[in-house]
Image (cartoon, grey):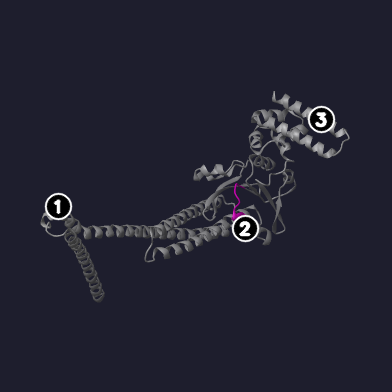
Amino acid sequence: MSLEKISAILDKQRLIENMVHSQAMPKHELVEDVVHRQHLAELQNLLVKLDAEEIAHVLTALDVADARMLWQQLTTSQEAQVMPLLDADLGHMLLENKEIDSFNSQIHAFELVGDRLQQIGINNRKELDNIKPVWIDLLNPSKAERHYVGVTYGLELPDPEDGTDLEVTSRFRIEEDGDIVLHANFLLDKSGDSRSVPVTFILHQGILFSVRNEDLPVFRLQRLRARTQPGYVSDCLDVLLDLYGADVEYSADSLEDIYGTLGKVGRQVLSETISDTEAARILSDIAEEEDLNGRIRSNILDTQRALSFMLRCKLFSASQVDDVKQIMRNIESLNSHTAFLFDKINFLMDATIGFININQNRRVTQLTVFGVVFMPINIFAGIGGMSEFSMMTHNIPWPIAYGAFVVTMGLIGWGTYLGLRHLETRKLKQASKQVLLDRDNA
């Protein structure tokens, strides 16, 4: 039923557009464009109502020209659902002339020209057939784009998000056809939004494929170095090692930022007084740096496992093995720094919580002092409220009697306060003398 409807719409559109094209009228091109847009809108409204299986059936039944035109009207999500249902040859034919959506995805290929990498922006899928790359980088590709690139080079490109749930032993593996698949996490350190971004690497027939859903500073740095520095890379393994090495450097820079932030926090914590508001802000800063430090430690350990796996596979040349060992030494150095930062974070956290407890104890002490000072006054006030007091002062005018009563209450409170201050001063003097004696004995 869907095939008949779409075929009828296409036939009607061709008939009307031919009639408009053959007639002479003012603004002929504008009218043709409006009619064409109306027909496309009608076709898109029908495609929205169809499921993936129906669309795949229609595409298979139509001729090549109509199938290509119909494919152009599908949304990205529809492409992703329909592509696995199509024959490989048909899918290749439909995708080869479709433009890449540059707003959502970017595909870059890198060829080795002389001793430098040359970057080639892939705007049309057919352009992949005319290059010999050593690295193909896919940024936020759709499922259809991953499928086409995979079909072009004879492999399957997964969504990098699918690799985050794999066990550690499955994150690095060798496929039956000899391809090496690596699932890695790269650090993205943004102010207030630091996180790990999953990246999938596949080494296939001398080409490195990298698939990721977010832009990363490490990849931008690698592209810049490879283009500007002669002899920076010689094959796909060099590219992969440099990406891992750049990620370790980026993690080291982030650790330096953590040191700077904790230094500022430490100066605040070790100041004489900290309010509860300042303490809450300090705890928030410490928690953020602790999360970033843990993320860095997890990522560099993941890099260390990946490099160890590739060493066991004996993929590298002698010079590349030296590069791997240098990266491993850098990782060991960063591990000691992350361990030290964890200890410092725990110390600052305990110190900040200690200041919060001191502030609470100070308020409790103030309440205790007020309670002790006013306790005798409350007792005396209770006596003054008894009927016996009125009986004892019935011959004395009430202003004089109660005035003297209030003055006596004030004197009792003041005397209690002075007594507490004297005891506190006496204890401080005894503590100071003890400190001096201990210092002299030492």
**Mark 3 to mark 2: distance in Å?**
54 Å
Q: Amino acid at mark 2?
A: Leu
Q: Position of residue 18 (x, y in %)?
A: 84, 31
Start-end of magenta stretch: 211-221
Q: Which disc is residue 221 wearing? A: 2
**Sooner in the amino-acid sequence: mark 1 or mark 2:** 2
Tell which residue pokes out farthest to the bottom in this image.
Answer: 440
Q: Which disc is residue 122 wearing? A: none
**Which one is closest to the eye, mark 1 or mark 3?**
1
Q: Residue at x 69, y 28 (%)?
A: 57
**Mark 1 to mark 2: distance in Å?**
87 Å
Residue 115 in magenta? no
Foreground pick, 208 / 334? 334
**Which one is closest to the eye, mark 3 or mark 2?**
3
**Sooner in the amino-acid sequence: mark 1 or mark 3:** 3
**Which one is closest to the eye, mark 1 or mark 2?**
1
In this rendering, would 116 be left or right of 200? right
Q: Are marks 3 and 2 in contact (CB under 8 Å)?
A: no
Q: Position of residue 220 (x, y in %)?
A: 63, 56
Q: Amino acid at mark 3?
A: Ile
**Mark 1 to mark 3: distance in Å?**
109 Å
Q: Which residue is mark 3?
A: 16
Q: Residue at x 28, y 57 (%)?
A: 364
Question: Would you call the spot at circle 2 few (<14 residues within 10 Å), some (14-19), or many (20 or more)?
Answer: some
Q: Position of residue 8 (x, y in %)?
A: 76, 26
Q: Which residue is mark 1?
A: 386
